[in-house]
Image (cartoon, rainbow, N blue to C red):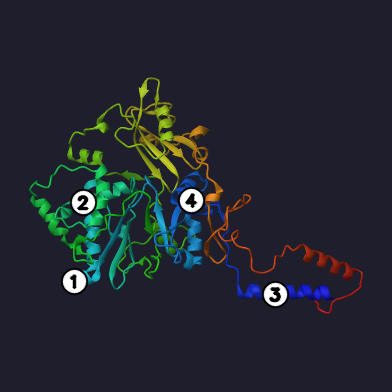
Amino acid sequence: MRKWEDRLKKVEQLAQSFQSNPLSTGYKPRLWPCQPSSVWKLFHRQSLALHFAKTCREAVHVFALEQETALPGQRIYLVTSYTELWHYYRTYPQSLMHCYEVIPEGAVCKLYFDLEFYKPSNFTADGKSMVSLLIQFVCGKLKEMYGIDCTEHNVLNLDSSTKEKFSRHLIFNLPNAAFKDNIHVGSFIHKILESIQTKGCISKTSKHSLQEIDQIKTTDRTPEEPQTKKHKLENENLSFLLVKNKDGDDCLFVDLGVYTKNRNFRLYKSSKVGKNAAFTVADDNKFWPKTQKGVSVEEGIFLASLVCNISFTGQRILTFSRETEANQSGRRQYGPAANKGSSLSGCSSSPHQELDQFVLTLVQKDGIQGSIRRWSYFAADQLLVYDIANFRWCENVTRFHKSNNILIVVDLKEEVWYQKCHDPDCKNFRSSSYPLPQEICLSYLIDLDEEDQMFLMDNSGNIELSQGPTKQPPQPQTAPEQLEKTSVENWDNAQDDQDYLDSLDAFEQNKELPDVYF
């Protein structure tokens, strides 16, 4: 009798504990084939998170997290998929609401803007009107320079304004087009705003960022060159971009300091640490996403807000660099980029030089000196795409094309490569996949130590420093399930099991029956 009473008491205690601390709905990986497996890893250094994301077989991405209790500027780096992040993003608003997208170096990305001004210093400024004018101006430049039709309906407009500061994020979801990386985005923006910058209205912070952008940009006009009527007209049209900072100095409405490598860009529905102003859809926003079946409108907005959420299929890659500007102006290009012997034809090498050299071995044979004209990295698909010059052999037609070049696509996730083609007749062709040599595979080059994962998340979404190196056996990385011991007694208790067996034997032998029935 005593044993049954003790067991009943334990069950009642467990029931009360679960009622007061209900379990949240767990994430179920691969509910259907298109969903990713569950990956959720936390790192104390951004470089470690980026390395892990590059070697992971799943489509994962890096995000930065801020904590209220952390030191100023300290961030934790999370690696997970877009789907899984969105699931927990809604579940744990306290721990994940200071979240930033990490824009990887060299990754193809959307055109984006960070806009802000200090309201007390600009009490006559009409923020909504300024945003609308800027979108119209940028859409006009995209049409003029790239032939792309774009309107306010292609621009996601997010707002996190307060009583003191007007703050917006603009993310351009262009139809089948994206920029090579955020450095090219910055160079493009620097160019189209060049006329207003010549008035000497750039803040110290902006000047610093422009020095980085100038490394890949060139102009013909010197400060002493007299402005044409066109320049004056642009100055008049762009005068709305001039604002005052807290000190009353002239600066730009557009923050030019957000186009650096591995930039952290605050997410939709996230706020800064110590602030309550999270990014929400602006009331003057005219963009609404076309969602797939099973994806809510809110999740569609979240996905559209991600700067690097771009698929390789059908994308036109936009660039703005020395080569772009030289081609537009009809000038001859000088320097190393003009050297026909240059293996990369004027384009800097990718972050994976071992892969660059391997691709060159594929297009430099039988007396033909093919070269890499340009490379593009699609972070969403983990694909490194090489545009090849001077080598036109196509597996589809088993011969050389007369005029159209080919593409070599390296799948970093599957560690294979395949060939595609620019020829219209081969538009939908993709060659067989061939394995990369082991010695150049990222999984071989990067040996990630599990001891570097120093942070854990519990079932309540709290992120804490682990008590030491976590050497655990391989298991699914579902976010909170593996990260906290339950506060109630462990169900897998050996003594409890023995008591149950003894009680069962007593019952079967009719020795002592309990007074309580189930």
Question: Does any portion of residue 274 appear in the rendered image?
Answer: yes
Between disc 2 and disc 1, whose residue precedes?
Answer: 1
Q: Residues within 10 Å of mark 4 (few under 14, many from 20)?
A: many
x and y percent of residue 329 in the render? 17, 40
According to the picture, the residue beneath numbered tag 4 turns out to be 60
Q: Would you place residue 351 above or below residue 94 in this image?
A: above
Q: Would you place residue 249 above or below residue 209 in this image?
A: below
Residue in the image at 85% along x and 67% along y: 502
The amino acid pointed to by label 3 is Gln
For mark 4, give the secondary structure: loop
**Residue with the most extreme bottom position:** 515
- Whole-number angstrom distance, CA of label 1 to CA of label 3: 63 Å
The amino acid pointed to by label 4 is Val
Say which mark, if any, is on residue 192.
2
Q: Would you place residue 35 above or below residue 98 in this image?
A: above
- Whole-number angstrom distance, CA of label 2 to CA of label 1: 25 Å
